[in-house]
Image: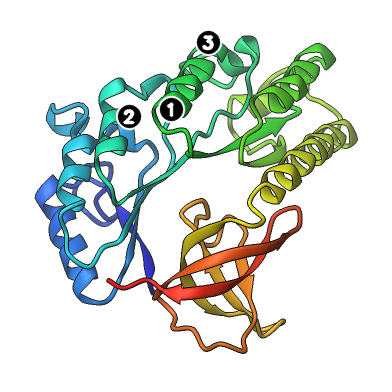
Amino acid sequence: KAATPLPLLCHPAHPRPAAQRPIDDCVAEARWLAGEGVKELILVAQDPTAYGEDWGKPGAVCELLDKLNTIEGIRWIRVLYAYPERISDEFIAALVRNNKVVPYLDLPIQHCDDEVLKNMNRRGGRKEIEDAIRRLRAAIPNITLRTTLIAGFPGETEEQYSELCDFVKTVKFDRLGCFAYSAEENTVAAKMDNQIDEEVKQRRADHIMELQAEISAEKEAEKVGKTYECICDGVDDETGMYLLRSAADCPEIDGSIMTPADTPLEAGAFYNVTITDADTYDLYGYAESKVEE
């Protein structure tokens, strides 16, 4: 596979299953993956910004990014899941200075209302969320920001839900998924009072996705006529078209850029693709040229 996860935690069978892997261990695996033809590394952990705290070195993710950036053969490095309240200026600086780190970040905020976030046992609040987004967009103007929201958490009032809708319309995330809250057995939230009716929860989640669809369609339309460096993931079985991704698209999560099959493309190779059309979540275009490595 041209893109593959690089876990920052030890395997569950490890004697310390929650232990964070040493930097040298991660770098050694990344070098091996590069030798196997991998072009994109996806750093995966519940919270990469906490990487290094297991062994008394907070912020070690910055050093890790610096070292991964030097590996020959790796073209893109993607960081998933960074909690807003933990995004330091040092972390943002590491994203900026390492040219292989793509301008893309997933901020799993879940909600924007301080009371709802407290009930979810989340550490930060709306102030921390908005501050992180402001600093990221100021430092990296072309950054793609993704998030996931939960609608209908126990006790969420109509006012709090309305606040969430306004937040979505104001912040305009590039990518956003919203799910109706689903009670998990034996969790604190499942035992809370003020559980919300299933139909209401789903209606709220659906409406937020409708809001995001308008935002996404607008943002995708702005890309028509522009050219992006993209990686080819192969051929779509249904349409026969090639599936490519820009730095703004995480594999198996975000949309694709589709190009006609009349010009053969190589899976795992990079191409300059000019966008000719857009719909809500996907783009269409043609490969201008192959990017030389």
Q: Are marks 2 and 1 in contact (CB under 8 Å)?
A: yes
Determine the CA span between mark 2 and mark 1: 7 Å
Which callout, 3 or 1, points to the residue nearer the camera?
A: 1
Which residue type carries mark 1? Leu
Q: Is residue 47 above or below residue 271?
A: above
Task: Quadrant for residue 87, please give it.
Answer: top left
Residue 127, numbered label: 3
Residue 150 percent across, percent down from the top left:
67, 32
The mark nearer the N terminus, 2 or 1, is 2
Q: Are marks 3 and 2 in contact (CB under 8 Å)?
A: no
Name the image quarter holding the N terminus: bottom left
Determine the CA span between mark 3 and mark 1: 14 Å
Label 2 sits on residue:
92
Which residue type carries mark 3? Lys
Label 1 sits on residue:
136
Label 3 neighbour load within 10 Å: few <14, some 14-19, many 20+: few
Q: Is residue 178 above or below residue 259?
A: above
Q: Residue at x 19, y 74 (%)?
A: 35
- Secondary structure under tag 3 reads helix
The mark nearer the N terminus, 3 or 1, is 3
